[in-house]
Structures are given as structure tokens and as C-alpha cells.
Image (spheres, rainbow, N blue to C red):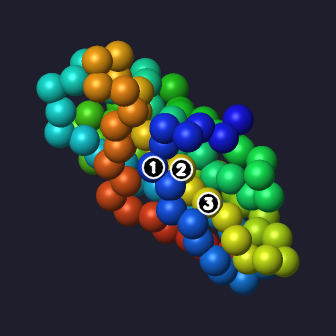
Amino acid sequence: EISLGLVGSEMCIRDRTYRLRLFCSLNSTYKNSTEFMKVQTVVDGVANVFELPDGYDVIGNLTRWLEQEITVPESGMFELQWGMENATKGWMEVPLNIIEIEET
């Protein structure tokens, strides 16, 4: 499902298979921020959500990365979307501190 409330960044790279690694860390007073966090790639209109590892917490994260393998089509286009839903403020941007893209 493509979520319109998420912040998105469209990217264009060579058509290959890549490993995406994302580092997200937040200094926040919001409790349960990770519970409402969503990060996904969209390729050819199909969304693929990053699975959050057991025990992952974006607040004060200093060591844990999110990882996903992605196959970029011939067009070279894909979108990275991220956000966090807050009941009173709606969708808010999740900090995306580092994006690492490595060809596999």
C-alpha cells in the first residue's frame, strides 16, 4: 500500500539489485514512536515495507540499521518513503539520518 502521508524521495540509479541500509535515530519525548513508524520502498507502484527488527527503537538509536534488498527496474526509478503517524499531529517525518545503497 502506498501511503500518501509519508515523506518521499524519488531516486534514479542503474537497474541492478541493491541492499539499502537506513539509519534512523530520534531524540524525542514521544513515547512509542517506533510503534507508529513506517519506512518503505516503492518500485513500479508496489510498496515494500521495511521490517523493524525485534526490540528496535528509533528513540536514542545509536547502533541499529534497517535493511532491505531492492531490485531497481530498467527505468532506474524507485521511491523511498518514511514517516510516523501521531494521533494528534497526523503524519510526521521520521528522522532518516543515513542512507546507504550498496550493489549486491
Q: Which amino acid type is shown beneath numbered disc 1?
A: Val
Residue at 43%, 21% (x, y): give it: 35
Mark 3 or 1, nearer chain start = 1
**Which residue is more in the foreground, 20 or 55?**
20
Residue wearing tag 1:
7
Q: Is residue 17 visible?
A: no
Pointer 2 or 1: first along the chain: 1
What whole-number distance in Å separates the C-alpha atoms at marks 3 and 1? 10 Å
**Vertical arrangement, residue 9 with respect to residue 86, above or below:** below
Which residue extends farthest bottom?
14
- CB atoms of marks 3 and 2 within 8 Å: yes
Quadrant assignment, res 59 = top left
Q: Is residue 51 left or right of residue 56?
A: right
- Report the quarter where the N terminus lies: top right
Residue position marked by numbered label 3 in the rendering: 79
SS for dot 1 = strand
- Residue located 38% across and 62% down the image: 98
